[in-house]
């Protein structure tokens, strides 16, 4: 599908734009001709994104703290003043800390849920109200994870937040359907960490080896999936979760018998 023809000029809000996946999303929508509202906590990194070739005319960037409800309202008001409303909201920002449950304190638990769950709720609510006021049949895309369905040790708080995000996605899908607004979750496959959530090289190697299709996720994988969920190609899809992970969330590749291959 020629997304550039359909998404050119569309107004797209992306949180966590300075991260690995956020950068892929910004580039995909920008190269499709969309106007971008890019947000992140890192103001200096965000400022550099405005020099990117895909930062189209009519785009803007704004640093916000997703843990602060007032800051989220300020962002929504900026969207209203710049554009009236958004056509697409991508709740991408998230943190992926590692720690055993017995070691996780209340403050860290709250930080994970503030960013991974509370912020998508608050921002989706605010942007949806703008869409409704402007009669925009928009698309909300929540960046979830296969961890919502596949529990692993040391990432239980993250996995729990993503399971809840999937339920929140379905809740918004139900309640916004009457306004023609769709809400879906996109589950990227494994990508190496960022400045916010770092992972060791050994973890990267182990994770990549376990992916059925044999590699980590790439920018084009995520970009094309997000453009699909934002476009009319998915017009009759809402409340869904789309894994783009090379089969990583299906199950284990481990073979416990002596014969390790079918042929």
Image (cartoon, helix red, strand yellow):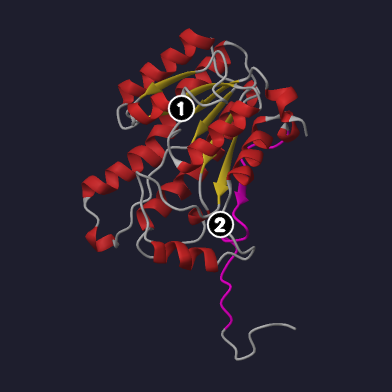
- Image quadrant containing the N terminus: top right
Query: Which of 27/222 is in front?
Result: 27
Kindly indicate the quadrant of the structure image that contains residue 151. bottom left
- Image quadrant containing the C terminus: bottom right
Provide residue 45's location: percent of width, then percent of height.
Answer: 38, 31
Kindly indicate the quadrant of the structure image that contains residue 178. top right
- Residue topped by disc 2: 216
Provide residue 20's location: percent of width, then percent of height.
Answer: 47, 42
Q: CA distance from mark 2 to mark 1?
A: 24 Å
The question of residue 10 being in magenta is answered with no
Looking at the image, residue 54 sits to the left or right of residue 60; the answer is right
Q: Chief secondary structure of the magenta span? A: loop
Depth check, mark 2 against mark 1: the one in front is: 1
At numbered mark 2, what does the secondary structure look like: helix, strand or loop?
loop
Q: Residue at x 32, y 29 (%)?
A: 65
The question of residue 245 being in magenta is answered with yes
Q: Is residue 27 above or below residue 127?
A: below
Q: Residue at x 68, y 24 (%)?
A: 7
Kindly indicate the quadrant of the structure image that contains residue 238. top right
- Residue topped by disc 1: 49
Provide residue 31's location: percent of width, then percent of height.
Answer: 63, 28
- Numbered range of the magenta stretch: 236-255
Q: Residue at x 37, y 56 (%)?
A: 199
Q: Is residue 262 above or below residue 154?
A: below
Q: Is residue 48 above or below residue 105?
A: above
């Amino acid at each position: 599908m020629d997304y550039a023809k359909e998404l050119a000029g569309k107004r797209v809000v992306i949180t966590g734009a300075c991260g690995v996946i956020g950068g892929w999303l910004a580039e995909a929508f920008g190269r499709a001709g969309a106007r971008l509202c890019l947000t992140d906590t890192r103001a200096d990194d965000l400022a550099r994104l405005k020099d990117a070739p895909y930062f189209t005319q009519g785009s803007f960037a704004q640093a916000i703290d997703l843990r602060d409800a007032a800051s989220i309202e300020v962002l929504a008001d900026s969207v209203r003043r710049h554009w009236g409303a958004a056509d697409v909201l991508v709740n991408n920002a998230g943190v992926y800390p590692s720690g055993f449950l017995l070691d996780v304190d209340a403050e860290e638990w709250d930080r994970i849920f503030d960013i991974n769950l509370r912020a998508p709720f608050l921002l989706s609510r605010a942007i949806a109200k703008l869409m409704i006021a402007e009669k925009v049949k928009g698309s909300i895309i929540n960046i979830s994870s296969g961890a919502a369905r596949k529990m692993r040790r040391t990432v239980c708080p993250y996995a729990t937040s993503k399971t809840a995000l999937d339920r929140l996605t379905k809740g918004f899908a139900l309640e916004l359907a009457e306004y023609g607004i769709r809400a879906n979750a996109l589950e990227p496959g494994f990508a190496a960490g960022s400045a916010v959530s770092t992972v060791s090289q050994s973890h990267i190697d182990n994770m990549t080896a376990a992916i059925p299709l044999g590699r980590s996720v790439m920018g084009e994988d995520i970009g094309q999936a997000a453009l699909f969920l934002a476009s009319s190609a998915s017009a009759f899809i809402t409340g869904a979760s789309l894994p783009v992970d090379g089969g990583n969330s299906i199950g284990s590749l481990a073979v416990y018998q002596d014969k390790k291959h079918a042929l």
